[in-house]
Amino acid sequence: MRCPFCGNVDTQVKDSRPAEDHVAIRRRRFCPSCGGRFTTYERVQLRDLVVIKTNGKREEFDRDKLERSIRISMQKRPIEPERIDQMISGIVRRLESMGDTDIPSKQIGEIVMESLARIDTVAYVRFASVYKNFQAADDFEDFVHELRPPTLDT
């Protein structure tokens, strides 16, 4: 593994342990050249996924991009980082086990929204505002109105 500080390719693993509910291995590494310490994660990748964008463009699935968008929607929410990691790993496993390597971005967005709705409604609305491209406050109001159960007027 290349050292992110000096570029040395001869780094040493100092510690390995399971991470993210045993779906990844966390490795603490040390660079003998510069003395830098850093962490890497090793995950199983079942297959290479390709995202089909709404404009028809194809791009390689990027777990980090998915993670960034989810973490942005969950910013300052009372959710443990481990819970977020478990959710992301679950989404990726679900995508990899779908059978097809080409996955429409719309389908990925729906899976993410479904997962967020179960964990935190504020993060769900935040993600939906970007995913559904809200343009005005009325868009938020309409979306939140759909979330609320109807009340009985007496």
Image: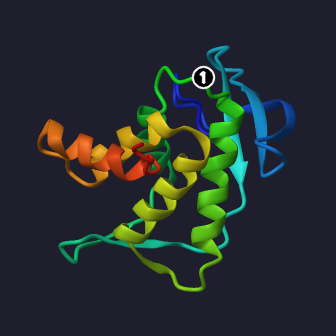
**Residue at screen point 61% across, 72% down:** 96
Please provide percent x and percent y for residue 35: 67, 14
Using residue 3 as the reference point, say whether residue 55 is left or right of it. left
**Residue at screen point 38% across, 41% down:** 125
Residue 10 in view, yes or no: no
Please provide percent x and percent y for residue 72: 41, 33
Outermost left residue: 136
Please provide percent x and percent y for residue 70: 47, 42
Per the image, the residue denoted by label 1 is: 78
Residue 105 in view, yes or no: yes
Q: Decide: is 100 above or below 2.
A: below
Outermost top residue: 35
Using residue 36 as the reference point, say whether residue 102 is left or right of it. left
- 10 Å neighbourhood of mark 1: few (<14), some, or many (≥20)? few
**Residue at screen point 62% across, 15% down:** 34
Give the quarter of the figure containing the C terminus: top left
Q: Decide: is 35 above or below 6.
A: above
When asked about the image quadrant of residue 120, the answer is top right
Say what secondary structure mark 1 lies in: loop
| Amino acid of disc 1 | Pro
Q: Decide: is 149 above or below 85.
A: below
